[in-house]
Amino acid sequence: MKLFYSAAALAVALALAAPVAASAATAKNVVLVHGAFAGPSSWDKVAVILRKKGFTVSEVAIPMTSLEADVAATREVLESQKGPTVLVGHSWGGVVIGEAGDNPKVKALVYIAAFAPDKGESVQTLSSNGPPTEGQKEVHPDAKGFLSIDPAAFPRVFVGDVPAAEGAALAKAQMPISATAFGTPASIAAWHSKPTYYAISGNDMMIPPQAETLFAQRMKATTVTIPSSHASPVSHPAEVAALIEQAAK
């Protein structure tokens, strides 16, 4: 399956993002949304760091059956938060937080090696030109139309900067995503109205780092680059947690 990006198409939209005003309130709540081919446990290392710093952390278990279902699961967790909240999405989770992030409790959005569509865009519309990455070549559908990464390739293309045993365990625990989710256009782009932060994974083999840079630029996000695989919450949790903490303040 092709999931590749046109730098030219994204560059046209860079000037369209409206400036946003930062909120004065400090957020003590963090809601974490995982990406495709992963699960809530992919956030565990980041969550431990944030909890030690006094944050209340919730890890959403999105079903990945559809964008609508994933947004509904995230909205449910947001409704339970008491006070300002930082909403964080990794990979596919970026699409989800762009939809759910219009909740008034959300103080800031944090994208971690994530898709960041504008209203009317889908993963597929952002994937119309250019060659697939090494990781995208290893994504395959099953008989029910759910996508997963070849388990043999997963440790290398998804999280190549952790010990091999840890990568193999993550491969066994990967969660497939419905192929139709990638074709669903965003109806909301909350990054137009919320302060936004982005962590680019410099060694990403799933989403091209150049595409991540363009996402961050058109959102006018506060941006850091981590020398990480796609799964930076697993391999570089301290850097990811530091950006979330910055967004909370």
Image (cartoon, rainbow, N blue to C red):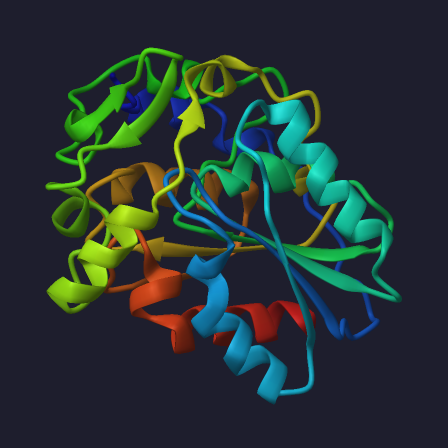
Instruction: Pinpoint residue 50: horizontal percent, then vertical percent.
Output: 58, 79
Towards the viewer: 77 or 9: 77
Towards the viewer: 21 or 237: 237
Instruction: Pinpoint residue 127: horizontal percent, then vertical percent.
Output: 34, 19
Residue 158 placement, left or right of 117: left
Residue 19 placement, left or right of 5: right
Residue 39 placement, left or right of 29: left
Identify which residue is drawn at 40% across, 46% down. 38
Which quarter of the figure has residue 125? top left
Image: 134 above or below 155: above
> Considering the image in quadrants, where does the N terminus appear?
top left
Question: How many numbered circles are shown?
Answer: 0
Identify which residue is drawn at 36% across, 45% down. 213
Q: Is residue 223 visible?
A: no
Image: 29 above or below 154: below
> Considering the image in quadrants, where does the C terminus appear?
bottom right
Which quarter of the figure has residue 129? top left
Instruction: Pinpoint residue 220: horizontal percent, then vertical percent.
Output: 54, 47
Identify which residue is drawn at 54% across, 18% down. 121
Q: Is residue 178 visible?
A: yes
Instruction: Pinpoint residue 206: horizontal percent, then vertical percent.
Output: 25, 39
